[in-house]
Amino acid sequence: MSRERPRANPKQLPARHHPAHGVLISEWQPTIVFLTVCTKDRSRWLANEQVHQTVKDAWTDADAWLVGRYVVMPDHIHLFVSPIDTSVSLDNWIKFWKSQFTKIAKKDRTFRLPSHPWQTDHWDTRLRNRRSYESKWEYVRNNPVRHGLVAQAEDWPYQGEMHNLRWN
């Protein structure tokens, strides 16, 4: 006689208020994470050249993880990252570059930074293979088109690639 595990009733499961985090870093294949970071209350202040340069400077200072391809939208940033220093968790790396961004921005008196610029949390998922990476990139690079900001993805000025993250 086989015993089946009882199924959880979705109405009985606790509601998750924040996404689950924690990236399993593999020794046998590349670790590439698709990450989305949003502004507080989805305020639309990110899409300008000053922010674009400042966020790249913050990522350069936060060198425990490499930033690959990215797109800066008005109220969120999509990016692909890979660890260099496995002793620094993704969560700590994100906190660090957000604080670096704020420090850099506050030094520049022309920068109009909201008092609470970032949403506390973020969304991340570890990519499993090259196909997943490429399909997520197509989604990300076409985000400005879907939002009606440009006619073609390559016309969006706030995107780039800081490091070439490869699946070998």
Image (cartoon, helix red, strand yellow):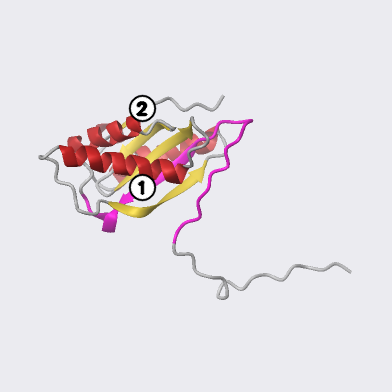
Whether residue 2 sits left or right of residue 54 in the image: it is: right
Quarter of the image for the N terminus: give it.
bottom right
Which sits in the foreground, 10 or 113?
Answer: 113
Residue 68 x, y percent position in the rendering:
41, 31
Which residue, given by chain and number where applicable, does mark 2 sit on? 162
Quadrant position of residue 9: bottom right
Whether residue 62 sits left or right of residue 55 in the image: it is: right
Quadrant position of residue 145: top left
Determine crowd level at label 1: few under 14, some 14-19, many 20+ residues with C-alpha closer than 10 A: many
Q: Mark 1 belongs to which amino acid? A: Val
Which residue, given by chain and number where applicable, does mark 1 sit on? 37
N-terminal label among 2 and 1: 1
Q: Is residue 14 above or below residue 55?
A: below
Instruction: Report the magenta residues as a range.
Output: 18-44
Q: Residue at position x 46%, y 47% from top?
A: 124
Q: Residue at position x 50%, y 55% from top?
A: 20
